[in-house]
Amino acid sequence: MSRISEVLERAKEIEPIAVKNGATIVSFADAMTLANADMVEGKSDLGMRAYNPDGTIARSKARFVAINVDSYFANRYKVKSKKMYVVTDYRAIKEQNTGKCYIKNVPCYVFYRDENGKLAIEKVMTVSDSEFISEFTNTLNNKTMAELLPLIAQFGTEVTSSELPI
């Protein structure tokens, strides 16, 4: 009985990395703990799945999603003139140690602190592949990237819908 209570206690202590489309995003180890807790509590639904007419599964009944946290938060950065330049392009980061990059201009987010001391994105720009390889040699920890990713997700220009213009 104590093992069951341990599983339930550990599941309560798990903090999700993010919540997307109603699914909790967690690490692989945390996903196993949550799955075990769901089985103990009887929340696991092993019944019939809903299918599309072509035979594919219509929807997932997953309540949480397991990810590789280090891949999710992969980044390289540099600081210049009180601004932080952050690259999150996973492929460019993985190829950086080879001295080559798959694209000539790597997308980069420019962060600064506003007058209230809060982090904000100034703009998105590109840096050359040679600059990325030689100057973006630092990485931010996962806790810091957890703060930055929501800002990146919210950043962008408003797009308006219109009728056919021609």
Image: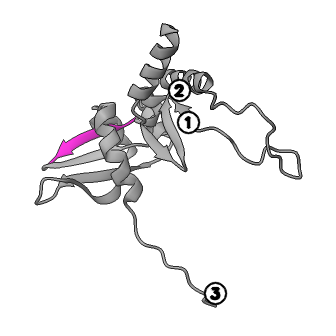
> Residue at point 42% right, 21% down?
9
Q: Amino acid at mark 1?
A: Phe
Residue 71 in the image: x percent, y percent?
46, 32
Which region shows up in magenta? 74-80
Cα–Cα span, label 1 and label 2: 8 Å
Q: Amino acid at mark 2?
A: Leu
Label placed on residue 64: 1
Q: In the rendered view, tell whether residue 83 sits above or below residue 142.
A: below
Cα–Cα span, label 3 and label 2: 49 Å
Helix, strand, or loop for circle 2?
Answer: helix
Mark 1 Cα-neighbour bin, 10 Å: few <14, some 14–19, many ≥20: many
Residue 109 in the image: x percent, y percent?
33, 52
Q: Are marks 3 and 1 in contact (CB under 8 Å)?
A: no
Mark 1 and mark 2 lie on one chain; the one further toward the N terminus is 2
Q: Amino acid at mark 3?
A: Leu
Front residue of this view, candidates 162 and 132:
162
Q: Are marks 1 and 2 in contact (CB under 8 Å)?
A: yes
Label placed on residue 34: 2
> Residue at point 41% right, 54% down?
153
Q: For residue 60, which quarter of the picture? A: top right
Q: For residue 46, which quarter of the picture? A: top right
Which residue is label 3 attached to?
164
Can residue 126 be seen from the camera position used here? no
141 with respect to 82 (left or right):
right
Task: Residue at the far right: name it.
Answer: 54
Mark 3 and mark 1 lie on one chain; the one further toward the N terminus is 1
Helix, strand, or loop for circle 1?
Answer: strand
Residue 96 in the image: x percent, y percent?
41, 32
Considering the whole magenta stretch, tell me its main secondary structure.
strand
Disc number lying in front (1 or 2): 2
Q: Is residue 125 magenta?
A: no
Can residue 153 be seen from the camera position used here? yes
